[in-house]
């Protein structure tokens, strides 16, 4: 399949409303994980950046000119930078929490891409998120030609040829299905991928309370996922919430056969049933 790089459609770019909703959700997660931070403060800080940027952007700028202005402001004046190899960082959570990124001016490409895209939208630059891993590229159309912004290189704008060369030399293009390159990333999948990265960071930190918050946020995006439901049950059990754990596993097994379930789910279910039955019998004996 040919890799299609050029086009004229803006239909896949996130709207201002969608970007604002995503920022609110990301800031809510940050505030839940670190309650000393107020969600509204985080959103207002991004909105203030947008106000500053608009004051520096002439009306009727071309997409290319707007991108130059945004890069000077975001990477130059404000000093934002990408932390692109989270797996090499002992604790990646600060690079994934929106308020920490706004304070330190350094963060994971996914977080930077959302802030950057929100600011771009405020000056009329419509950006599309494209599925190019392990980093994040943003796409815009300038004079009918696709351009790609590399957030890991201070917003460098790449032509189609530049992008292909970068993919070959930095990301081993041959290992990535060509049909999947440049797929538009829906906002639901963006947030799910972000939360999964945050979950990995908190697994490494070993904080089950935080993991439960992240798991609940993930399940809001994937309410039909039995795997997430079973994982939440194990988190509840780990935290001592035995009735909640059993309720989740009962729901899990109402949609899935024991033979098809992971052993850890079936063992947990059997142990919880036995434990709570013993507790009920003990309560009855006390009452008698």
Image: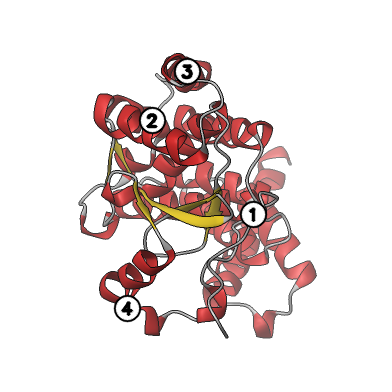
**Residue beneath the point at 51% across and 45% down:** 214
| Residue 69: assigned label | 2
- Between 102 and 277, the one lying in front of the other is 102
- Residues under labels 3 and 1: Cα distance? 27 Å
Q: Nearer the viewer, residue 203 or 101?
A: 101
Q: Which residue is drawn at 70% across and 54% down?
A: 247
Q: Are marks 3 and 1 in contact (CB under 8 Å)?
A: no
Q: In this view, does 8 lie above or below 79?
A: below
Q: Can residue 79 be seen in this view?
A: no
State the residue position of label 4.
172
**Gap between marks 4 and 3 measured at Cα:** 41 Å
Task: Bin the neighbour count of mark 4 within 10 Å (Cα to Cα): few under 14, some 14-19, many 20 and up.
Answer: few
Foreground residue among 140 and 214: 140
User: Quick one: SS at disc 1?
Assistant: loop
Say which label, 4 or 2, has the lower sequence index. Answer: 2
Q: What element carries label 2?
A: helix
Instruction: Using residue 224 as the reference point, say whether residue 97 is left or right of it.
Output: left
Residue 21's label in the rendered image is none
Labels 2 and 1: the sequence-earlier one: 2
Residue 192 is left or right of residue 226, and the answer is: left
Closer mark to the observer between disc 4 and disc 3: 4
Disc 1 vs disc 4: which is toward the camera? Answer: 4
Q: Do the residues labelled 2 and 1 touch (CB within 8 Å)?
A: no
Q: Distance between the residues labelled 3 and 2?
A: 30 Å
Residue underneath mark 1: 186
Q: Which of marks 3 and 2 is nearer the N terminus?
A: 3
- Residue at image mark 3: 38
Q: How far apart are marks 1 and 4 (CA)?
A: 25 Å
Q: Tell which residue pokes out farthest to the front in this image.
A: 143
Query: Is disc 4 in contact with disc 2, using a CB cutoff of under 8 Å?
Result: no
């Amino acid at each position: 399949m040919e890799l299609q790089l050029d086009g004229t459609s803006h239909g896949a770019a996130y709207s201002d409303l969608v970007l604002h909703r995503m920022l609110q959700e990301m800031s809510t997660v940050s505030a839940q994980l670190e309650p000393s931070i107020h969600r509204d403060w985080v959103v207002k800080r991004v909105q203030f950046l947008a106000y500053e940027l608009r004051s520096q952007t002439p009306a009727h700028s071309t997409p290319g000119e707007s991108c130059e202005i945004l890069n000077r402001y975001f990477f130059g004046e404000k000093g934002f930078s990408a932390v692109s190899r989270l797996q090499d960082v002992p604790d990646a959570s600060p690079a994934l929490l929106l308020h920490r990124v706004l304070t330190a001016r350094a963060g994971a490409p996914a977080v930077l891409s959302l802030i950057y895209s929100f600011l771009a939208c405020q000056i009329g630059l419509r950006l599309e998120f494209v599925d190019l891993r392990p980093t994040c590229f943003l796409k815009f159309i300038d004079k009918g030609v696709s351009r790609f912004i590399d957030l890991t290189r201070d917003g460098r704008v790449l032509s189609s040829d530049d992008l292909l060369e970068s993919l070959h030399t930095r990301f081993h293009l041959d290992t990535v299905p060509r049909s999947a390159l440049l797929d538009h990333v829906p906002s639901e999948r963006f947030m799910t991928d972000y939360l999964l990265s945050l979950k990995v960071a908190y697994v490494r930190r070993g904080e089950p309370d935080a993991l439960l918050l992240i798991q609940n946020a993930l399940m809001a995006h994937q309410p039909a996922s039995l795997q997430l439901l079973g994982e939440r049950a194990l988190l509840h059990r780990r935290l001592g919430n035995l009735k909640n754990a059993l309720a989740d596993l009962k729901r899990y097994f109402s949609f899935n056969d024991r033979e098809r379930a992971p052993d850890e789910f079936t063992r947990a279910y059997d142990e919880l049933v036995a434990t709570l039955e013993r507790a009920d019998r003990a309560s009855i004996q006390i009452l008698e």
